[in-house]
Image: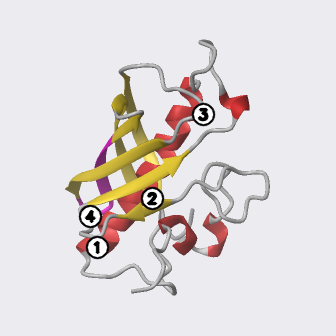
């Protein structure tokens, strides 16, 4: 098996410019989400840059936590919907794009800077256009935040 494929790298051309996860946004974060080997989860790992510290020094600010959940959640929704159709994620895949309809976050503990942050998602529900995904953010082996996203498939005319 070859190298793992980031879900965001399979977005159609016009959807590749998100500041958080768009591979073609030169100033962006280039967040990457990857399906787990068994396809039951999607995983994102990031070490945030120092400028994203929050009101509590040496901790990540909440807006950046929300952005990570938003970008990883919509990518996860796209993957879970794709997989649910019996399709595989391949290098030439152009995956259906999902956007956020609702994002809920429970901040559990401050998220430290200069540490790898791992976000793991799992699907709760897949509908015709809607996917609900639950996510957990960890750093230093502890849960820092949890999130639920309701993502909807982008219509062709959007």
Which is nearer the N-term, disc 3 or disc 4? 3
Quarter of the figure that contains the C terminus: bottom right
Q: CA distance from mark 2 to mark 4?
A: 17 Å
> Residue at coordinates 74% horizontally, 59% vertically from top-left?
25
Query: Mark 3 near mark 2, Cβ–Cβ under 8 Å?
Result: no
**In the rendered image of this protein, does residue 30 appear above or below residue 82?**
above
- The circle on residue 70 is none
- The circle on residue 128 is 4
- Front of the two marks 3 and 1: 3
Q: CA distance from mark 3 to mark 2?
A: 25 Å
> Residue at coordinates 40% horizontally, 45% vertically from top-left?
119
Query: Mark 4 near mark 1, Cβ–Cβ under 8 Å?
Result: no
Residue, disc 1? 83
Q: Mark 2 packing: few (<14 Cα in 10 Å), some, or many (20+)?
A: many
**In the rendered image of this protein, does residue 65 appear above or below residue 68?**
above
Q: Residue furthest right?
A: 26
Image location of residue 140, percent across then percent down: 41, 33
Query: Mark 3 near mark 4, Cβ–Cβ under 8 Å?
Result: no
- The circle on residue 114 is 3
**Residues rendered magenta in the picture:** 127-135
Callout 4: SS = loop
Residue, disc 2? 75
> Residue at coordinates 49% horizontally, 50% vertically from top-left?
45
């Amino acid at each position: 098996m070859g190298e793992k494929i980031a879900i965001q790298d399979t977005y159609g051309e016009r959807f590749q410019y998100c500041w958080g996860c768009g591979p073609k946004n030169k100033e962006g974060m280039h967040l990457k989400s990857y399906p787990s080997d068994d396809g039951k989860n999607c995983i994102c790992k990031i070490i945030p840059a120092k400028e994203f510290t929050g009101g509590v020094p040496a901790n990540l600010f909440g807006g950046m936590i929300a952005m990570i959940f938003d970008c990883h959640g919509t990518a996860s929704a796209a993957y879970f919907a794709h997989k649910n159709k019996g399709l595989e994620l391949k290098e030439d895949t152009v995956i259906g794009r999902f956007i956020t309809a609702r994002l809920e976050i429970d901040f559990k503990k401050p998220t430290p800077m200069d540490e790898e942050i791992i976000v793991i998602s799992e699907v709760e529900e897949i509908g015709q256009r809607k996917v609900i995904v639950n996510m957990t953010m960890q750093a230093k082996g502890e849960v820092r935040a949890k999130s639920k996203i309701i993502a909807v498939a982008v219509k062709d005319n959007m």
